[in-house]
Image: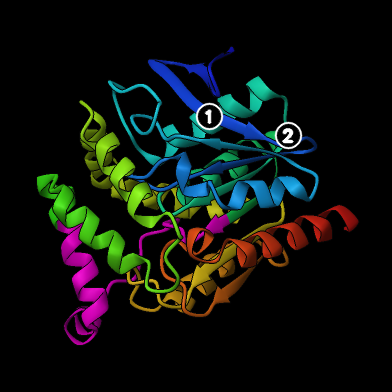
Amino acid sequence: MSNNAGNVFYVEVPDGRIAYESVGRGPLVVLCPGMADSRSSFRLLAPLIARAGYRVVSVDLRGHGASSTGFSSYNHADTATDLLEVVGALGGPAVLVGQSFSGGAVTIAAATTPDAVSAIVEIDPFTRPPAYSLTTFLRDRRYRRGAILLGRFAFTGSLKSWLKYLDLAYPGRKPADWDAWLAGLEANLREPGRKEAAQKMAASSATLTQAGAQLADIRCPALVVMGREDSDFPDPEAEAAAIVEHMPAGTGRYVMLANAGHYPHAEYPEAVADLIVAFLADRTRG
């Protein structure tokens, strides 16, 4: 069931509702952000994909943005279920694009419900338990600083630490509306229940084992887009390659973006849109 309020639409799911906005017409592409973020993360990317002839829907994670709070759990499988509810309400199948935390979710959705998912794109995804290295932690200042800031936010809910993390995670070209966007995100996270939802997502990282195990069951085309300067991973390219290697042969491929961090779709939206549109065109020809 779907309803709307102004320019924001809602899909009713068990225990709450998921907010989304839509632009364009054509085959359905659903964009889902990472934890402690909102659908506004795709404000620059969505119109570019829509211009190529797609209906692009940007969703808020449960507990985030304009979605409701108070869900009983906030893990990758929950987000996969929410995305499938959105696809069902809007009329699938759909291409699912998951960034960061949502990378694991689109993996699960594609593997468990293949009829609803025609392709997936994972942007700097947390799709499997990452191979952390104490040596890299001690040697790599950017990686170490990012891990510390993420840990502070996850354990204490410090928004100051989260905002410092975001500054680090955008090492390339910050969007022109960076200051206004960041202030809006902070205001949203200060609303009751939202910061806590993000912390619960961070605490659910053990469910990445479940998402990683599902990589072998993906049957649709898959694209992994990874920023070379992503401070969330000891070796971003090795992580991207490992994700693809765990998919069935010929299913996935990865692309690295120079100078980009954990949010390449906001740092370099034109480049990411070109990659996604070309990937979807290849899928259609195939």
Question: Residue sitting at 53 percent across and 46 percent down?
Answer: 43
Q: Residues within 10 Å of mark 1 (few under 14, many from 20)?
A: many
Q: Which quarter of the figure has residue 164?
A: bottom left
User: In the image, which is nearer the foreground, mark 1 or mark 2?
Assistant: 1
Neighbourhood count class around disc 2 (C-alpha, 10 Å): few under 14, some 14–19, many 20 upward = some
Rendering coords of residue 165 (x, y %): 25, 61
How was the colour assigned to the protein in this rendering? Answer: rainbow
Foreground residue, 85 or 33?
33
Measure the alpha-carbon separation of dots 1 and 2. Answer: 17 Å
Residue denoted by label 1: 20
The N terminus appears in which quarter of the rendering? top right
Amino acid type, residue under disc 2 in the picture: Pro
Which stretch is magenta? 122-151
Disc 1 is placed on an element classified as strand
Sequence order check, earlier mark of 1 and 2: 1
Could you tell me which secondary element the residue under label 2 belongs to? Answer: loop
Task: From the image, tell me which residue sits under label 2.
Answer: 93
**Residue at 77 percent of width and 55 percent of height:** 280
Residue 219 seen = no
Residue 150 magenta-highlighted: yes
Q: Nearer the viewer, residue 134 or 93?
A: 93
Query: Which residue is pictured at 16% across the width and 83% down the height?
Result: 138
- Across the whole image, how many numbered discs are drawn on residues? 2
